[in-house]
Each structure stands twice: as C-alpha cells, then as structure tokens.
Amino acid sequence: MSTTDKKATVVIVGGGVAGLTLGNFLLRKGISCIVLEKGSRDYVEQRQRAGALDAGGVRRLHEWGLAEVVEGHRHGDLDAGMTLLLEGEKRQWKTGDDSEDANGVFCPQQILVQNLIKVFLRDGGDLRFGAEDVSLHDIDTENPLVRYRDAAGSTKTVSCDFIAGSDGFRGVSRTAVPDDILTCSTHEFGYAWLTAMAEVPADPLAMLAVHSRGFAAQITRGPKASRLYLQCPLTDTLEQWPDDRIWNELDTRSGEPVTPKGPIISKQVVPLRGVVFSPMSYGRLYLLGDAAHLISPMSAQGMSLALHDADVFARALVHQVENHDSRLLDSYSDTCLDHTWRQQAAAVWLTETVHDSGDSSYEGEFRKQIARKNLENMLGPSAANHLPT
C-alpha cells in the first residue's frame, strides 16, 4: 500500500542530535515538520554516543527555550572538569575568566537525545520511528518529496518545501547530491582509538592521559557507564585487545590503577580523521551534523557542530517563512562551512598536540618534543615546581 501524506514545511531525515534539535527549534516557531528516524524509539534512546556541549551549544539551547534538555548535568568550564595525567602526573588546564568554553556541560548524547525526544513529543511534534528505505526526490524543485516505508510495511510519500538531511555519515541524504556537485575533503591522523564501553562509572567524569605508550582516556557515559579510549595503530584488531589488556594498558598510561574496573560490553577500533563535505546544501536539501562533516573525537565538538548547523538552518528558515526572504537559506552552506573549518582547524591542532606528545613511534621524537611544549603551554605549572625550599 502506498499513500501520500499532507504537505509539511520541512521533512527532517534522521532523529539524532541535529535532527531532533532542529525539530524542537522549528516547533517553537510554529513551522510544521516531520522527523523520520530509521531506528525504533528504544534503540535511539539507548544508543551510546560521545557527548559534551561547549558554551555555544548550551547557549543556543537556552536561546530557543530548551534549557530543560540539559538540566541536571554538570555545568562550568569543561577543561576544569577534566583530569590530565602527563606521564602519570596530575596537571591542571589553564583557564580564563572570559573563556568561551566556560559554562559548557557534560551531557551524554544518549541523555540529550532522550530529553529532546520527550520534549518534542510532549509539545506535539511528529516523530516517526521505524522509517525504512528513505529516498529523496525532486530536491532541485520547489516541491521535493520524501518516500519511506513505515513500521507497518506501507510506503509513504511526504511532500514538503525543504528537506533537512541529518541522518549521519552513512545516511541516504547526502547521496541525493549529485557526485559532480559534492566534494569531500579528508584528513587522516595516522592512528586509531581502541574504544570500549565499560559498565563502570567514571570518576572524575573525564580523565585524559598522555604517556610514552600513547594517549588514553576514560569519559563518563552516564552514572553507570564510561567509555575507554586507547591510542593504537591503524592495523590493530579487536583480537589483540582482550579485556584484561585494555584495563592494564589504561592503568599503565594513567600512571596508577584505574578503579573501579568492570565488564566491557563492546569495543571497536576507530581510525581518527576529519571529513568535510561541500556544499552543505543543494536545491531544497540542507545537510546537518555528521551528514556534512566528521570531526576528530578528541575535540568533543561533534554535538556542538550539530547544534550549530540546526541553529543556522532554523533561523534561516524562520526568516524565509516570516519575511519571504531566502538570503539566509542561500548562505546556509557558506555560513556553516566557515564555522566547520574553524572547528576542524582547532580539532586537528588539539588532536596532534595531545597524541604526538606521547608515543614518538608515530611521528618521531622531534614532533613529540614540539607537541609536548605546545601541551605544556595549555597547562598550569607542575606541582613539583611549587615544592617549598
């Protein structure tokens, strides 16, 4: 069975941070939208992803009346909430009173998504889980269409004015842009992270370690879970990383035993890289979040970039609807790409500084010493330098 739904102003493909945030923004301005999400509600709400919002992301949520979705999580300077162990010695990050990073928030992406879903549905939003086989049609016309198969197996077609493609790096939205229009720029860092989800809390919420054996970290994923990270060669396999080795290596790189230890429920080897697709719009299709870019996870900017895209697109759309003026929509791609490249530049510098400071086998001793000096400039003095004489 095939049916055609009534027209919506925007069809949002993907119910992650970018899509759900955009949906909530538009709902607050009375702009009709439909969010199509491939997964079930239970799957989406339980899906574990990295998550920290910078001050800009928190500010945008407040400006749109969505402060409640991050309430109850630790606010304050994100750097101040991170412990850095440099060759086992605890160091403090330098902070400034006027830092843009102040008033960021540790909020696991899983929790943010749960809250965004709850608020969107509470306020009357149209969120359709189990939307399979999504396809985009006529995106270069004034009447684009989105076709999908619903949870009952029926084929649905939705007509709309605009499509927001926020279905992630492997989603279908970006594939609707012609190959001769879309360009992809990438940077490979030359190493990977062994990432493992452990059923143990993180205390402190974020611990980073720089060691001659490589980078390591333990980051909170909620009150009962944390994600472990270990720098490793791109050629490493999961078979080389049994659970005991992961915990032992985390102990070694931290310079002290990490407690508590517990079950590891999943793990994978993730190459570190940055990716930017351009343009971020084509016809009536606008790409948001991971559908348009990937940023080094070392920067913890993935969610904040998604919120930035949603904010720019929502404001441009509101301007179009209220003033019949498309200039902000026309400049959406350029506006977002300028911000994305600035964040990519900072992410590459930070990633290379932290990783090159440790294991010299990747980039050599010269780069290690340069990176170590750059890292030292980000840190307060060692406690050993303040011993009484």
Image (tube, rainbow, N blue to C red):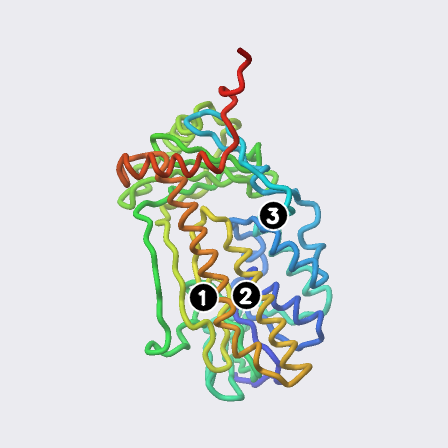
Q: Earlier in the sequence, mark 3 or mark 2?
A: 3
Q: Which one is in front, 245 or 73?
A: 73
* Residue at the outermost top position: 389
Mark 1–mark 3 distance (CA, rounded to whole Å): 23 Å
Q: Which residue is mark 3?
A: 107
Q: Amino acid at mark 2?
A: Asp
- Circle 3 SS class: loop
In the rendered image, the vertical position of residue 164 relative to residue 233, given as above or below = below
- The dot on residue 113 is none
Say which amino acid is labelled 1.
Ala
Q: Tell whether label 1 touches label 2 (CB within 8 Å).
A: yes
> Residue placed at 42% from the left, 31% from the top?
250
Identify the mark at residue 292; answer none if there is no mark: 1
Q: Position of residue 242 (x, y in %)?
A: 35, 34
Secondary structure beneath disc 2? helix
Q: Residues within 10 Å of mark 3 (few under 14, many from 20)?
A: many
